[in-house]
Image (cartoon, rainbow, N blue to C red):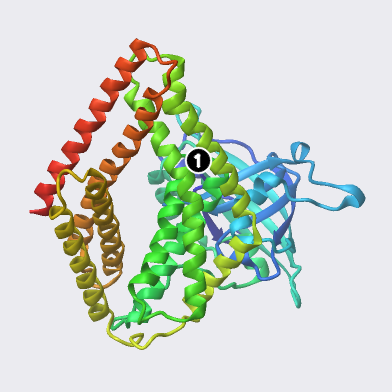
Amino acid sequence: MEIELKYDVDPTLPAPDFTELSAVAGVTEPAIENLDAIYYDTENLDLAANKITLRRRSGGHDAGWHLKRPGRRAGRRELQVPLNASHDEGAGGVIHVPDVLLEQIRVHSRGRALRPIGAISTHRELSELHGDDGQVLAIFCNDTVTAQSLLPDGHAQAWTEWEIELVDGDEKLLRKADKFLRSIGAETASSASKLARTIGPTPTRGVPSLGREPTAIDLVTTAIAQHLRHLTEQDPRVRAHEDDAVHQMRVATRRIRSVIATYPSVLAGPRTDAVAGELKLLASILGNARDAEVQAARGEQLLIGENASAAVTAALVGEQRHREQLAINRTLTSLDNPRYFELLDEIERLVIEPERGPDADRKARAALRDAVDECERKLRKADKRWRSTDDSDAAERHARLHRIRKQAKQLRYTADPGSLLSPPTKKATARRAKAIQELLGGYNDGAISRGQIARAAADPRLSAADAFILGRLDAKEEAAMAKSLRRYRRLRR
């Protein structure tokens, strides 16, 4: 995580004396580095539009490939691959971006070729700021920069800038350093990065904001943009096999599809229908991996404290982990398919050029109210049908509970866009729907788990001890499901 501040300075301004700050006990003599970097992006500047930079730098202590992406809160996340380990230079001197970096940006480049867009040379004087105990609090860089844009009609320029980057120091030090540097003549950098200054302004892709009197189409497209951003954030996490990434990507996919389904008179047309169909397929692919992951984790939790045999562990955990890995492999293959990239392009197009339905210009609050009311009506109807089902028909009761859960999830996703309005609305509705969804989701997971336990128990090779353990696990799941139902009944009342 890179947390730094940048400043424009007059080249004649002397380097600051950071020992004037109480937290800084000493500053090292400047180390001289000469850095040469080539920056890469697509022809459409897809990386720059998402505040991402990719460069190949030679010279200095951190020569190599650097990928910088926005952090979730402060600073930027940086991933580095050393030149001597990347094997990036192919036959004829052709430069190849390391695969580990390509995986992290594929959701933005989407198969489009990467090419050089800027060349930047930096003469750097680098000093370390030390604390009383000798730890490195921050790094200060006095940079003399020469840059050339490699875009059509690009031009050359030169400037001097200062950077101070936290290492082991805290943000309190950064605030004091900021105040100090400004007092001696430093000014906020005119661009967020050297690349931005080199190639000039580029349109950024974020979630559009709603005006004072948003229409229904404004609300719908803003909600879709919000969920699309979440989806693209999860894509590199899925590729890197990070925890919960598949689940979060699946949720984002379902949310976009839910918004489309909930407002058929606001956003409607053949492009919209095609996107909804592709989203359903993507959610299904992600769902296979997620469902296996949930059941494997549930099996592991059930077996804690049990003296289960290898056969029981394999049946309740091993098989699910195998299914999960197969599903993950299929997911990764799908994420490299041009069809997936085309889907992302079409969702972006829906946000920018939506297919407007007859109610597109309705007031957002009115459209939201009616959509939430309709979802609540369907939820009440599903609950009524479940309560009217004969207790002896276990399969039908389970199917109708599953329907309630789906309706609660639809209600939650329908009400959630109300948080984008000012002032927000329908937050309590979304919270209640989420509670129902989670309770009945646990009930459904328990039912699936009991089915796996029953299949394991049907193995004729099972020992008496294993059969006893499986019976106890089934009783645990049955009790957990009954508890979920009791809590749902209280919540429903």
Which residue corresponds to the image point at 26% horizontal and 53% vertical from the top-left?
405
Question: Measured along the vertical axis of the image, is residue 475 above or below residue 212?
Answer: above
Q: Pinpoint residue 448: horizontal percent, then vertical percent.
A: 34, 38
For disc 1, the neighbor class at 10 Å (few under 14, some 14 to 19, many from 20) is: few
Q: Is residue 363 visible?
A: yes
Which residue corresponds to the image point at 60% horizontal and 50% vertical from the top-left?
104
The amino acid type, in three-letter code, at marker 1 is: Glu
**Closest to the observer, 339 or 157:** 339
Q: Residue furthest left?
A: 493
Q: Please give the count of numbered marks on the rendered protein.
A: 1
Which residue corresponds to the image point at 56% horizontal and 48% vertical from the top-left?
331
**Closest to the observer, 415 or 312:** 312
Residue identifier under label 1? 242
Question: Measured along the vertical axis of the image, is residue 120 above or below residue 103?
Answer: below
Q: Is residue 14 visible?
A: no
Q: Pinpoint residue 226: horizontal percent, then vertical percent.
A: 41, 65
135 sits to left or right of 82: left
Question: Measured along the vertical axis of the image, is residue 245 above or below residue 465?
Answer: below
Which residue corresponds to the image point at 17% horizontal and 58% vertical from the top-left?
385
**Closest to the observer, 421 or 20:** 421
80 sits to left or right of 264: right
Helix, strand or loop for disc 1: loop
Q: Residue furthest right?
A: 92
**Closest to the observer, 370 or 225:** 370
104 sits to left or right of 18: right
Q: Pinpoint residue 304: horizontal percent, then vertical percent.
A: 33, 20
Q: Pinpoint residue 83: horizontal percent, then vertical percent.
A: 76, 41
